[in-house]
Image (spheres, rainbow, N blue to C red):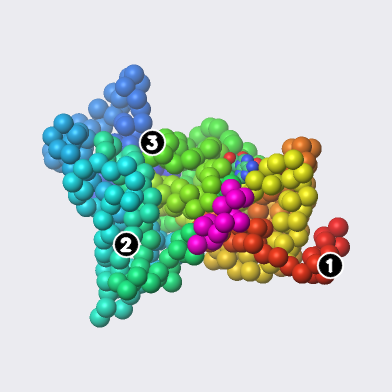
Amino acid sequence: MAQILAPSMQCQMGSAKISIKAGPVTAKMWNSLVLNHRLSGRNSFKSASKFRAFSVKAASDNGVVNRLEDLLKLDLTPITDKIIAEYIWIGGSGTDLRSKSRTISRPVESALGLPKWNYDGSSTGQAPGEDSEVILYPQAIFKDPFRGGNNILVICDAYTPAGEPLPTNKRYRAAQIFSEKKVIDEVPWYGIEQEYTLLQPNVKWPLGWPVGGYPGPQGPYYCGTGADKAFGRDISDAHYKACLYAGINISGTNGEVMPGQWEYQVGPSVGIDAGDHVWCSRYLLERITEMAGVVLSLDPKPIEGDWNGAGCHTNFSTKSMRDEGGYAVIKKAIRNLSLRHKEHIGAYGEGNERRLTGKHETASIDTFSWGVANRGCSIRVGRETEKQGKGYLEDRRPASNMDPYVVTSLLAETAILFEPTLEVESLAAKKLQ
Ligand code: ADP
Ligand code: MN
Ligand code: MN
Ligand code: MN
């Protein structure tokens, strides 16, 4: 992790050596070293000894730090049944994640065993000051990789005291769609490819990029290795393991085309789980980047110009698409999607027009297109799906900052519930040929 911070600190402080001595940076260094140490594993003598050397230095700066670390690692299970539950919710912008903790008297198996809670909605842009109470309903639980033990993370959605979902509560409507019989019977699967960009703190410029300048052009970075090509691998890896620990259905990860940009995939997950898992994975990423002193950006086009944007490709299939004869069902879904292109674009993330330019492996925002193995289309169908005559489609339009509750439920609605008239459908079919 010290490597990750090196580029930014060199730029700000002149040299990494000096920055270790500087007061404010020491805390950040410490945090990143803690992560480094935790990740280094017991038998990695080399990095463990490096860590010790640093920790002695940090402890002499501030003797409290080592003991704090000991307390953070305390195992509560032999002492008490009580657990810590971190209640997580989406704030007023629709993408900011908020959380606070409370004690629960004993370990729980599901969100059903947890009490509702409240928060001050006037501080998150979700309620007026004079009537600020917002109620959290626990919806899904995950194991807490930060606190360990029986402690949990709780994904919640937000309601007024009268029981009305807040406008930012997109889960509520999604859960309604996913509880329609037709949708349940089709067992909708989602594989979500979350791309993100890591930024140096303060300067908000991608990790590994020279401040005030640019790295060499894109080409060597996608799935690249080496100190001049991969920036932030420890964060990606720490996040991968944290997700697996938490019980998130993460399926892989890779370095992206733009340096400092990464991707991980969540899925296939069924129905509302896809949204819960992606939101929890984003929460973990926020926490891990916080520890590393690196800023997470889900902006769809963090750097203007000849640099790839960040998307959230959503792979989607229904039972009938996965079964024999599924290719015809996929084509029908694509027809439906072509008819509702505007609605989908409107729900696929803020600022997506900066990303969907028709360049950098995207289709133009104004036109709907599909193709087999074509990364310049709105919808891509894989070669394997074409060959097998069944499988799934990839919606390449969603931006990295999309709300997975909205995107997954809208796909289900358009592909499973939406019934265009036969005339409209045949017109759309002609246009797409
Ligand atoms: P890409 O080739 O576009 O980079 P990835 O391998 O990054 O694709 O992501 C594909 C995602 O789709 C994975 O999360 C995978 O689990 C998921 N997936 C695989 N099969 C299906 C399916 N039948 N329906 C929905 N998602 C699927
Ligand atoms: Mn991918
Ligand atoms: Mn990608
Ligand atoms: Mn993809």
Residue segment shown in magenta: 176-188
User: Which residue is located at x 35 percent, y 21 percent?
Assistant: 44
Closer to the camera, 7 or 379? 379
User: Which residue is located at x 38 percent, y 54 percent?
Assistant: 139
Q: Which residue is mark 1?
A: 427
Q: Amino acid at mark 1?
A: Leu
Looking at the image, in which quadrant does ligand 1 appear? top right
Q: Which residue is mark 2?
A: 136
User: Which residue is located at x 49 percent, y 65 percent?
Assistant: 173
Q: Amino acid at mark 2?
A: Leu
Closer to the camera, 379 or 253? 379
Q: Is residue 255 magenta?
A: no
- Residue 243 at x, y = what percent? 42, 40
How many dots with numbers?
A: 3
Q: Earlier in the sequence, mark 3 or mark 2?
A: 2
Snapshot quadrant of residue 122: bottom left
Snapshot quadrant of residue 98: bottom left
Horizontal side, residue 317 vs residue 1: left or right = right
